[in-house]
Amino acid sequence: MTKPSNPEVGAGCEPVVDRAAVEARLQTRRAELAGLTAAHEDDRRPVELDQARQGRLSRMEAMQEQAMAIEVERRREVELARVDTALERLAKEVYGLCVTCGEPIEPRRLAFDPSTPLCLGCARRSA
Ligand SMILES: [Zn+2]
């Protein structure tokens, strides 16, 4: 069974989203992520064979710390991409609709994470 496509859909079916508030939250998060990326740049540098530094911290520990910093940064990049996508979706007026099934995303879910692209059901299925 296919749903009839209605070109006038939207007038009464748009998700109720406070776009200005959502955009402000997303922009704030974006700035936070960019700030963290800049603040931790040193942590991701290759481990130096610096004797003074190695006196306090073994090379192994330093490499583990660097690996962790790189992983944290990778997660930041993933979140930044999500935030950017959410901002694009906001601009295209499809924000708040699940990218997989097209149904409105639960408002509480969006309130918790405004960058989420999936409804609860789809998020559970893709987890
Ligand atoms: Zn969905």
Image (tube, rainbow, N blue to C red):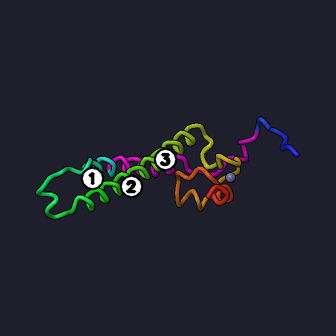
Counting from the top left corner in percent of width and height, residue 17 is at 59, 50
12 or 115: which is nearer to us? 115
Name of the residue lying farthest toward the right: 1
Residue denoted by label 2: 72
User: Main SS of the magenta segment?
Assistant: helix
The answer as to whether callout 1 falls within 8 Å of ligand 1 is no
Counting from the top left corner in percent of width and height, residue 111 is at 54, 59
Looking at marks 1 and 2 on the same chain, the residue that comes earlier in the sequence is marked by: 1
Could you tell me the amino acid type at mark 1? Asp
The answer to whether 3 is drawn above or below residue 121 in the figure is above
Gap in Å between the C-alphas at discs 3 and 1? 24 Å
Whether residue 115 sits left or right of residue 12 in the image: it is left
Residue denoted by label 3: 83
Could you tell me the amino acid type at mark 3? Val
Q: Which residues are magenta?
A: 9-35
- Label 1 Cα neighbours within 10 Å, binned few <14 / some 14-19 / many ≥20: some
Residue denoted by label 1: 43
| Residue at (85, 43) in percent of width and height | 2
Could you tell me the amino acid type at mark 2? Val
122 or 6: which is nearer to us? 122
| Residue at (59, 37) in percent of width and height | 92
User: Is label 2 in a helix, a strand or a loop?
Assistant: helix
